[in-house]
Amino acid sequence: MLSVRAARPLLLAFLCAAPSLTACGDDDPKLKVTNLSPDKGDSDGGTYVVIKGNRFIKDGPRNAKIYFGSRQGSIVRFQSDSELIVQAPGGKPDEVVDVLVIFDPGGQLTIKKAFKFVDKDDAGMSVDDLNTSGKTKK
C-alpha cells in the first residue's frame, strides 16, 4: 500500500501528463499576454475586458498600464496569475486597435488588432456577461 507521501508524486505525474490540466503548475516561466475577452466593446468606453496570459503575479507584485490603441484603459484588478481585468476606454466606432500591456517589472506585451470599438447597440454585452468564475452560466 502506498503512503500519502508516496502517492502524491504519482498523482502529480499523472496530472502533468494530461495536456488539458494545469495542476502541475506553470511550465512556462515567461511573462506573456495571450488573448483577451471580449474582443469588442462600447465605443463610449466602460467595457470590462479580461486579459489572459501567464505569470501576472507569481513573480511578485507588478504595476500595469494598458492601452487600447493610443487610449489608456483602467486596471480593475489582477484576478489571478493568468487573468487581469481592465476597463476599456472609448474609441471610434469600427476602429480595430492593438492592445498594449506594460508591466513594471516585466516590459511591454502587445496583442495585435485585438479589440474593436462598436456602437453601444452593437456591443451586445454588459458587465453581467463577464464570467470570471470559470463556471458555465445557466
Image (cartoon, rainbow, N blue to C red):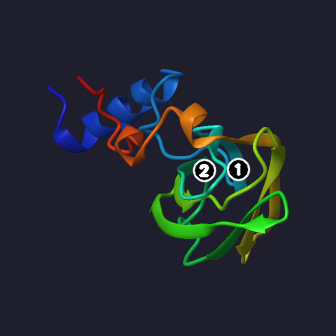
Dot 1: element: strand
Kindly identify which numbered label has been placed on residue 47: none
Residue at image position (67%, 50%) is: 43
Return the disc, 2 or 1, that comes first in the chain's sequence: 1
Closer to the camera, 33 or 73?
Answer: 73
Residue bearing the label numbered 2: 51
Closer to the camera, 125 or 76?
Answer: 125
Residue 17 x/y as whole percent: 50, 23
Residue at image position (70%, 50%) is: 33
Is residue 111 visible in the rendered structure shown here? no
Gap between marks 2 and 1 measured at Cα: 7 Å
Q: Residues within 10 Å of mark 2 (few under 14, many from 20)?
A: many
Residue bearing the label numbered 1: 33
Vertical side of 125 occupied by 71: above or below: below
Closer to the camera, 101 or 72?
Answer: 72
Q: Are marks 2 and 1 in contact (CB under 8 Å)?
A: yes
Dot 2: element: strand
Residue 65 x/y as whole percent: 69, 72
Residue 27 x/y as whole percent: 61, 43
Residue at image position (55%, 76%) is: 60
The amino acid type, in three-letter code, at marker 2 is: Ile
